[in-house]
Image: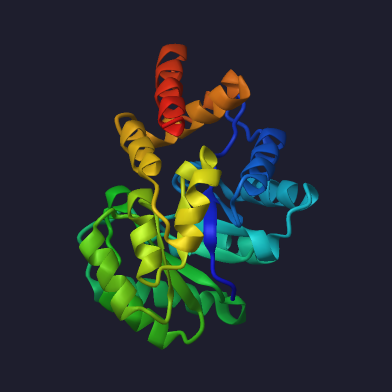
Amino acid sequence: MARIGLNCALSSAFRADGTMDLPRMVAHAKWVLANGCDGITVFGTTGEGASIGLQDRYAVLGAMAGGGFDLRKQVIAGVSASSEEDIVAQCNAAYDMNCRAILLAPPFYFSGVSDDALFSFFSSVFKKLGARLRNIFLYHIPGMTRVPLSVELTRRLADAFPGAIEGVKDSAGDWPMTARRLKELSDLQILVGDERHLANAVKNGGSGSICGLANVAPDLLRPLANDGKDDARVHAMVNAILDYSFMPAIKALISARLGDPDWRIMRAPLDGFNDTDTAVLAGKIEAIRKQ
């Protein structure tokens, strides 16, 4: 399959009652593609994917298809759950809608589990998917899941299920470990979530990124993801955003760009930004862009 390049971990739009706001979400997805992204990932961390159930997943993917997206080329679906049954159902929804790939997080409730136990879990999921199994990106984000995915486990799964594991998204922000993945898993697509490491990763064989900042600055990120050309403004933007909680901060910046306060709505139990914090952060990001 084609190299991922710059893929936006798309923020999810909600209404005040917690339901999906599909028109806003589709419009935003079109904007990120028009401004530098090669594709989008729905239901990832930035998109509050762990809060989005099966019915809403079909609705979002259907809206993307109805909005003119080629799901087989442009849309990756995040999958995050704690039970095999739920993971298989979410994967099947993505396959039903013919998505480009699946970004698969480990089961996130039980921490401190062994590689052997994780191998058994993933193997059971993959066997249940059967002939549908394809284009899996394993999602290493231990800061959220509390379950790291080791290089050894990735290699073992890739060897046990030939052709099924397309790559890894490394969102741990640990450059030495990212460098090890790039070296030891060079047959797979290695994607980074920390935009500050993106250019260096691409220069060392990385295949791009699925990242949250692409909701805000896809034009600045594209040279990093596709050419390995770094930009100090990207580092400064990430550092400014990380002074806040990342998910609502990204939504606040989308809201500021559009002049649309409803974009700040988070699905419970998460909280969104207020007017003051939105204005302050948007001002910082705009000042950085002008540097």
Q: Residue at x 55, y 73 (%)?
A: 135
Q: Quadrant of residue 80?
A: bottom left
Q: Residue furthest front?
A: 291
Considering the image in quadrants, where does the N terminus appear?
bottom right
Q: Nearer the viewer, residue 223 or 179?
A: 223
Residue 1 visible somewhere in the drawing:
yes
Q: Is residue 266 visible?
A: no
Q: Residue at x 30, y 77 (%)?
A: 183
Q: How many marks?
A: 0
Please report the residue visible at 67 percent of the width from the left and 33 percent of the height from the top: 24
Q: In the image, what residue occupies the spot 70% across and 38% down?
A: 27
Left or right: where 32 falls relative to 265: right
Please determine whether, in this image, residue 254 is positioned above or below residue 127: above
* Residue in front for this viewpoint, 175 or 122: 175
**Residue situated in front as seen by the camera: 103 or 58:** 103
Q: Is residue 157 left or right of residue 264?
A: left
* Front residue of 97 and 235: 235
Q: Where does the image place residue 68, in percent across and percent down from the top left? A: 78, 51
Instruction: In the displayed orientation, state which residue is furthest to the top.
Output: 276
Q: Is residue 61 left or right of residue 266?
A: right
Residue 150 location (% of width, % of height):
27, 70
Query: Quarter-wise, where is residue 271 in the image?
Result: top left
Left or right: residue 98 versus residue 49 is right
- Residue 148, image x and y in percent? 27, 62
The chosen color scheme is rainbow
The quadrant in which the C terminus is found is top left
